[in-house]
Image (tube, rainbow, N blue to C red):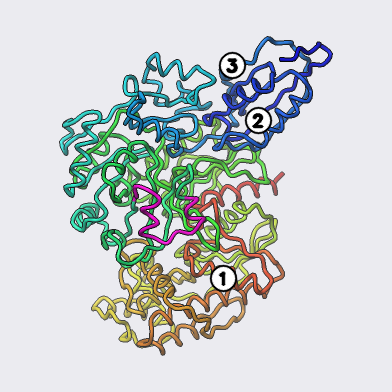
Amino acid sequence: MSILTRNEIIRRRYALKGAVQGVGFRPFVYHLAIEHELKGWVRNDSAGLIIEVEGDVAKIADFEKQLHHHKPQNSIVSHIESFNLTPQFEADFRILSSDNHPEITILMLPDLAICQDCIREMNDAADRRHRYPFINCTQCGPRFSITTALPYDRPNTSMAAFEMCPECEREYHDPLSRRFHAQPIACAHCGPQLELWDQKGNCVAYGDSALSQAIMHIEQGKIIALKGLGGFHLVADATLDRPVQLLRVRKHRKSKPFAVMYPSLEAIQADCVIAAEEKALLCSAAAPIVLVLRKSGIAISLWVAPNNPYLGAMLPYTPLHHLLLQALKRPIIATSGNRASEPICIDNQEALEQLRDCADFFLVHNRPIINRADDSIVRIMAGKMTLLRRSRGYAPLPIELNESTQQPILGVGGHLKNTIAYMQGNQLMLSPHIGDLSTSKAIGAHEQAIAAFSDLYRNLPARVAHDAHPDYRSTQLAQAKRVNCLSVQHHYAHALACMADNRIQAPCFAVVWDGTGYGEDGTVWGGEFLQITPEGYQRLLHFLPFPLPGGDAAILEPRRSALGILYTLQADPGCLPFPTAMSAFLWQALHHHINTPQTSSVGRLFDAVAVLLGLCDQNQFEGEAAMLVEFIAMQSDHKLVYPYHFEQGIVDWRPMLLAILNELGKDKAWIARQFHNTLAAIIVAAARLQDQRSILLTGGCFQNKLLLETAQFELRQAGFEPYWHHRIPPNDGGLAAGQVMAALRMNESCA
């Protein structure tokens, strides 16, 4: 090693911000410094990571280059500041203990899927963590789900209750170990343990025996409630009809697709058509559920996803799931462990009480889950990822914005697919998926999520934004419990969320299509074309309103939308393929204008077309009818378009629907495809009526892959630049982000 004189030594300080804690960044820096013969130290602090190195100028320059280009795999460095200091002529390089400052600006990492190194160790009979279902290192394992406070150190996690054995403690303090300061570090001697419970909560097996017996029960067709990373799964053999049907009965889930966990990527590829982008997502550290096209004749039960060409597939992402699938060697149902419309269970006793009627046995452990995180759902659309449900693996990783706020802003989201959003500085944090706020447990989870973000970042929101709908529980809770509240129009929030997702500025033109949203005029909006300006928005165009008999009841009964359409067209309701006595009653309500609010919703137009085509008259889950229209349209690929016209800011859909009525009895796939083509043509025609090149495609209707891909292609052909969602869901799961952006805009206008 060369000996430098005091005149040749410099000292340099680096302050890194971003997701730099809990990902092995300090041991990476330690190795890098030793390799370059540098002295100094590294430590976590409340702002991120601080490094001070001193040594040869050229070696420090190379150290800095490596710091930028070879950082740990799961880290995200959003900002680096560096400057020179006076050399201190230290003797070595050290890793210092964390600084705990009250101002928290670091990023909280989401939970990460088990890494290949840990899988190899877990499967090595000679390794001391052989078959240990809670193995982890700095590159994988729980993060957000076990964290009580920041910075992310063991005392601030639910692992604080587990005292490390001498071997784990040695690894934890060894900078050369892969588990150096891996906060959830544990082994079979000192860490969490498995138990198998019966429906009464009696422990019938412990440790590895609990896992073995759970595997046996699954093979026998039983349903297991399994405690995972961010909550419980309900698990059953996906190749057997009986347990899948039984789970549907027990969970009161008649047709909504179940997610399927496969033992390997090869097993998924055998059953499904996998594109390169989908493969990358399946194998990523986020390990989401990915919607992929299924092949015909596969062993998966048809009851897993009835009448659906897609499967929601994922790979095992915890050591426990890996051990389970390695033994079963077949795919399993891995659906959220919850009752209908309630958040996923995270506590053992809660799961026993809530899921006793669903599960035959409970595979639990004693590591507490602090923050729930359901599985994320992703779909590749137009070659890019779109998060349909942002949760485990992604939340609460911040989205960095161009804008910034001095004081925190909270968005409380909508009523369905609820999430909350919290913005501090230029970082927007979305909570994991909470769900529909229709039960007391969901409302409790909503309040817990708000408290968790406020506690983690030690800063209460200075401004709270909510939906304009007065009957949304999120709106009522915000107005009852919080000050400085701001009401944000539903579709404006969708547009702002899409802008934030793509980091684009006003002015732009937003196509916002969904099922329902409270409009400024008191009607139900949902087919909107908004001009977004730096100051706000203007409703430039919208679909012709039609009456919706029963109002919100139409969400689960598409035939109500069909009747409203037929009434507007002055058509005979007898043409409906689902004639009922209820139809006659609703027709009278329409005639006398009794509880028939007006709507411009494109989502309800989809419902009406589904009914007219004989695909669905009652939704078993939100959006089922619209999905069926999309799926049947995929069977045709023609380019024809139905007639439509614009008049005084109104998109008149009546020519299109009259043409569809005239074609009933013809090929359903042909009609459904032409319906999609027409909607895309309407988008392009509307874009041509204004002078903005940037076109946003947002709202729940743009979860439809065929619609989005057709629209974005036609927009590009016409010379426009389309933008859609990637990191923020296009559905109501993204509303909270848009609400925060609206509050930020108001702050800027008032400044």
Which residue is situated farthest in the bottom direction here?
Answer: 662
Check residue 130 for magenta coloring: no
Which of the two labelled residues, at mark 2 and mark 1, occupies the earlier sequence position?
A: 2
Q: Which residue is mark 2?
A: 16
Secondary structure beneath label 3: loop
Point out residue 353 in the picture as x, y percentages from the top left corner: 22, 39
The residue wearing badge 3 is 96
Q: Are marks 1 and 3 in contact (CB under 8 Å)?
A: no
Q: Amino acid at mark 1?
A: Ala
Considering the numbered disc 2 on the image, is that residue within a helix, a strand or a loop?
strand
Seen in the picture, residue 307 relative to 152 is either above or below; the reply is below
Q: Can the viewer see residue 431?
A: no
Q: Is residue 111 left or right of residue 101?
A: left
Label 3, residues with CA under 10 Å away: few <14, some 14-19, many ≥20 = few
Residue sitting at 63 percent across and 21 percent down? 42
**Disc 1 marks which residue?**
711
Q: Amino acid at mark 2?
A: Leu
Are discs 3 and 2 less than 8 Å apart at CB? no
Q: Is residue 199 left or right of residue 292?
A: left
Mark seen at residue 591: none
* 641, 457: nearer the viewer: 641
* Magenta stretch bounds: 261-281
